[in-house]
């Protein structure tokens, strides 16, 4: 696949996500206005659109520096984009570094974990078209 094809697919995906978000949420949310909820020690979520406990959604995620999330799975896929910080996504096959602007995809039921490596919080956005759940595998 050429770079132009990739760019077209990425642009179409972003437009689809934006259309979904605008139908369910305000046009914009200032970072200072995010409503954070502690999910686990060192792990906070803030909704952008939808309801992650029920259906398709987008959310901001913040890991405190040094936070390690153990291996786990989700019933449904999700996509992520790193906003700031440096972390590793951990898979059975190895570790994948993730930095500012990087994108990743985790398929449903794929075991994975995360570790925030930076001295600043790891701050990223995730999107899924179904509810979010977690099952620890360790």
Image (spheres, grey):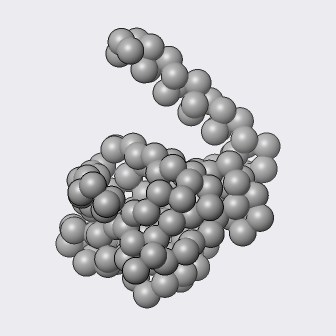
Q: Against 128, is 51 above or below?
A: below
User: Residue 130: horizontal and vertical position, in percent?
Assistant: 70, 54
Residue 39 image point, x, y percent:
54, 81
Residue in the image at 66% along x and 32% along y: 16
Viewer-closest of 57 and 107: 107
Find residue 108 and report its image quarter. bottom right
Above or below for 7 versus 107: above
Residue ID at (32%, 77%): 68
Q: Which of 35 and 98 is in front in this view?
A: 98
Q: In this view, does 33 lie above or below 101?
A: below
Left or right of 27 on screen, residue 78: left
Position of 102 compared to 38: left or right?
A: left
Q: Which quarter of the rendered picture does the C terminus lie within?
A: bottom left
For the point 56% across and 33% down, the residue is: 14
Q: Camera-side residue: 29 or 89? A: 89
| Any part of residue 75 in sight | yes
């Amino acid at each position: 696949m050429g770079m132009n094809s990739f760019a077209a697919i990425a642009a179409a995906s972003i437009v689809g996500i934006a259309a979904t978000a605008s139908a369910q949420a305000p046009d914009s949310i200032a970072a200072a206005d995010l409503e954070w909820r502690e999910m686990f020690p060192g792990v906070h979520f803030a909704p952008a659109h939808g309801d992650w406990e029920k259906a398709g959604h987008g959310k901001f995620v913040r890991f405190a520096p040094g936070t390690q999330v153990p291996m786990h799975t989700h019933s449904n896929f999700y996509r992520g984009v790193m906003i700031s910080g440096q972390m590793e996504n951990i898979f059975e096959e190895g570790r994948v570094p993730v930095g500012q602007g990087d994108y990743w995809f985790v398929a449903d039921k794929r075991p994975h974990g995360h570790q925030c490596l930076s001295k600043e919080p790891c701050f990223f956005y995730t999107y899924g078209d179904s509810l979010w759940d977690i099952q620890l595998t360790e």
